[in-house]
C-alpha cells in the first residue's frame, strides 16, 4: 500500500488529484485540510493539516510514501515547507505545486526559495510549475461574477497572452509525479494547449456565457489598490510576470507525462455553460449588484487564481 498525503485536498488541484489517487489500487489517500470535517471526497481519509499548527504534522505525515505540497502563499512558506519536509520519513517523495517559469526569477525570490526548500530536503522530489488555472473563470472568489454577471473580464495583461491550464490536467501530472518511478528530479513546466490573448479569452467566455464578455485592461496599480505587505508584493510580481509573457509559454508536458493533451478553454467551459448563463439571469433579477474580484482568497495567491 502506498500512502500519499495531499496537503490541500480541497484546493483546485488537490481535489481532482485525490479523486485520481483513490481510483488507483494500492493507494491510501490522506486528505490534508485545516478543516478536515469538510473533506468529502469519497475514499479519502480526512487528515488534520495546518500550516499554522506544526504540532499536527507528525500525525499527518506518519508513514507517508509521497506528499503533494500545495504551496501556501504566505511569506514564511519556504521555511514552513522546509520544516515539514524535515519531519518526513527519508523515503518520502515530495511533489511541490509551484508556478510557471520560476527559473526566470531572482535567486532570492520567494517562489525560488520555496523550491529550494524542497531541493535541499534530502528527499526525492518533482516540481510542478503550472501557468494560471482556468478555474479562475468559474470560481466565485475570482472572475466568475465579473464574467458571468457583468460581461466583463478586468485583467492586467499588458497585451501578453496566458496559457490557461485546467487544474485537472495539473492533477493528472501530479498523480504521475507522485506514483511513477523515474519522476525524481523532474521539473514539469505546465500549460494549457494554447496561449490566449485576453481579448481572445473574452471571446471564448462570451460563447460560453451566451452574452458578450469584454476584456478590460487594468493598470497593475489598480489591481494593487487596497492590498499591502506580502500580498501586495506577490500580486505585483505576478502581474509583472504576466506582462512579460511568463505565463504564455506553451509546453507539451501534460501530454508527455499523461499521454493525452491538455483540455482547451472551450472544453473546460462547456459543462459550465448552464451555470454561467443562469448566473447572468440570477444577477440580472437581483438588480446587478456584483462585487469586484476577491483581493485575496485568504490563503492563496491574491488575484492569481
Ligand atoms: N490559481 C492559479 O492560477 C495558480 C497558478 C499557478 C500557481 N498557483 C499556486 O498554487 C498554489 C495553490 O493555489 P490554489 O489556487 O490551488 O489554491 P486554492 O485552490 O485556493 O487552495 C488553497 C488551499 O490551502 C488550504 N489552506 C488554507 N488555509 C490553510 C492552512 N492554514 N493550513 C493548511 N492548508 C490551508 C485550503 O484548504 P483548507 O481550507 O481545507 O485547509 C486549500 O486546500 C499557490 O501557491 C499558488 O500561488 C496558483
Image (spheres, rainbow, N blue to C red):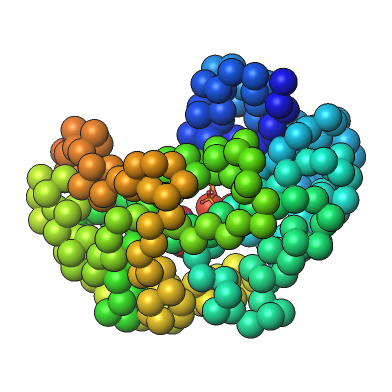
User: Could you tell me residue 154's position as x and y percent?
Assistant: 29, 66
Say whether residue 111 is visible.
yes
Residue 171 image position (x, y, % from top left): 49, 41
In this picture, residue 257 sits left or right of residue 47: left
247 horizontally vs 42: left or right:
left
Q: How many marks?
A: 0
Q: Residue drawn 69% across and 32% down? A: 4
Residue at image position (60%, 38%) is: 180
Camera-side residue: 114 or 138? 114
- The quadrant in which residue 217 appears is bottom left
Q: Is residue 107 left or right of residue 150?
A: right
- For the N terminus, which image quadrant? top right
> 133 left or right of 218?
right
Residue in the foreground of this view, choosing between 129 and 181: 181
Q: Quadrant of residue 89?
A: top right
On the image, the x and y values in percent for residue 126 come to: 64, 53
- The residue nearer to you, when weighing 198 against 129, is 129
Residue at the (84%, 55%) spot, across then down: 122
- Image coordinates of residue 41 in percent, x first then y, are 54, 22
The answer to whether residue 302 is visible is: no
Query: Is 249 located above or below residue 89 in the figure?
Result: below
Amino acid at each position: 500500500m502506498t500512502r500519499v498525503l495531499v496537503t490541500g485536498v480541497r484546493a483546485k488541484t488537490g481535489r481532482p488529484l485525490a479523486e485520481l489517487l483513490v481510483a488507483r489500487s494500492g493507494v491510501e489517500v490522506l486528505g490534508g485540510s485545516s478543516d478536515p470535517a469538510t473533506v468529502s471526497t469519497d475514499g479519502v481519509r480526512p487528515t488534520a493539516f495546518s500550516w499554522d499548527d506544526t504540532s499536527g504534522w507528525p500525525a499527518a505525515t506518519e508513514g507517508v510514501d509521497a506528499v503533494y505540497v500545495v504551496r501556501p502563499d504566505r511569506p514564511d512558506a519556504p521555511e514552513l515547507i522546509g520544516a515539514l519536509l524535515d519531519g518526513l520519513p527519508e523515503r518520502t517523495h515530495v511533489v511541490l505545486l509551484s508556478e510557471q517559469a520560476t527559473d526566470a526569477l531572482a535567486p532570492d525570490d520567494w517562489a525560488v526559495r520555496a523550491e529550494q526548500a524542497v531541493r535541499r530536503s534530502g528527499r526525492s522530489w518533482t516540481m510542478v510549475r503550472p501557468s494560471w488555472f482556468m478555474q479562475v473563470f468559474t470560481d466565485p472568489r475570482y472572475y466568475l461574477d465579473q464574467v458571468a454577471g457583468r460581461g466583463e473580464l478586468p485583467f492586467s495583461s499588458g497585451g501578453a497572452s496566458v496559457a490557461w491550464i485546467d487544474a485537472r490536467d495539473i492533477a493528472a501530472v501530479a498523480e504521475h509525479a507522485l506514483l511513477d518511478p523515474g519522476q525524481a528530479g523532474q521539473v514539469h513546466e505546465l500549460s494549457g494547449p494554447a496561449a490566449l490573448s485576453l481579448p481572445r479569452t473574452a471571446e471564448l467566455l462570451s460563447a460560453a456565457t451566451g452574452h458578450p464578455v469584454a476584456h478590460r485592461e487594468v493598470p497593475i496599480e489598480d489591481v494593487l489598490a487596497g492590498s499591502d505587505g506580502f500580498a501586495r508584493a506577490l500580486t505585483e510580481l505576478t502581474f509583472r510576470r504576466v506582462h512579460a509573457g511568463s505565463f504564455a509559454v506553451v509546453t507539451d508536458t501534460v501530454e508527455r507525462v499523461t499521454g493525452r493533451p491538455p483540455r482547451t478553454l472551450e472544453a473546460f467551459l462547456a459543462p459550465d455553460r448552464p451555470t454561467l448563463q443562469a448566473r447572468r439571469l440570477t444577477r440580472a433579477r437581483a438588480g446587478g449588484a456584483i462585487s469586484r474580484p476577491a483581493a485575496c482568497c485568504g490563503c492563496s495567491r491574491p488575484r492569481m487564481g
